[in-house]
Amino acid sequence: MDKEQQYDPEVLKEIPPELLAEAEGEWFAVNPKQDCPHQENLNWKEIVGNLSKKTITLPCTKCDNDKENWMCLSCYEIRCSRYVKGHMGDHNKETKHPISLSFSDGSFWCYDCESYVFSPGLRELAMTFSDIKFPSDKEGRIDINDVVN
């Protein structure tokens, strides 16, 4: 990887070290927390019902930013990321709603765990999100369980 493609070290400082996997100092991956207890109270059926092609393109309800937005998985509020104006973080501080879904990459962040999180329930939600955001990829998708088992 050449220097122009390397990640900003300031961004890496924001990620807790235990969540980073590194190989030869040239790349990093985030290892999401697998045992987040805060997802147990989420209403999966209602969350899926609130995801649509329109929803994932909605702007931040505070600043109208239409890039880098997240959806609160407790109340479905759409707010921008910390890399824009940080309105989803403000929402968490105001409401204590712990988990949000990124419309950019389909990842999940738990503010209470201070970590990216993943689980079987979130996996199903991630697949639903992917089907909505990338409808043409649906037929060609390989299920990881088919590869592993």
Image: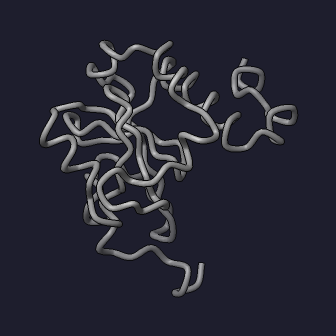
Tell me the quarter of the image containing the N terminus.
bottom right
Task: Describe residue 67's horizontal placement relative to residue 142 as left or right.
Answer: left
Task: Work out which residue is located at the far right of the displayed protein and give it.
Answer: 139
Task: Describe residue 40's horizontal placement relative to residue 130 as left or right.
Answer: left
Residue drawn 50% across and 26% down? 50
The picture places residue 53, in percent across and down from the top left corner, at 64, 40
> Could you tell me how many numbered marks the image carries?
0
- Residue 97 falls in which quadrant of the image? top left
The picture places residue 125, in percent across and down from the top left corner, at 54, 25
- Residue 146 falls in which quadrant of the image? top right
Residue drawn 40% across and 39% down? 71
Q: In terms of depth relative to the viewer, which is nearer, 149 or 39?
A: 39
Q: In terms of depth relative to the viewer, which is nearer, 52 or 144?
A: 52
Residue drawn 73% across and 43% down? 134
Q: In terms of depth relative to the viewer, which is nearer, 27 or 38?
A: 38
Task: Describe residue 1's horizontal placement relative to residue 36 as left or right.
Answer: right
- Residue 148 falls in which quadrant of the image? top right
Q: In terms of depth relative to the viewer, which is nearer, 84 or 58?
A: 58
**Image: 36 above or below 59:** above
The picture places residue 40, in percent across and down from the top left corner, at 32, 13
Residue drawn 58% across and 84% down? 2
**Image: 102 above or below 74:** below
Tell me the quarter of the image containing the C terminus.
top right
Task: Work out which residue is located at the far bottom of the displayed protein and give it.
Answer: 3
- Which color scheme did the rendering employ for the protein? one colour
The picture places residue 142, in percent across and down from the top left corner, at 79, 32
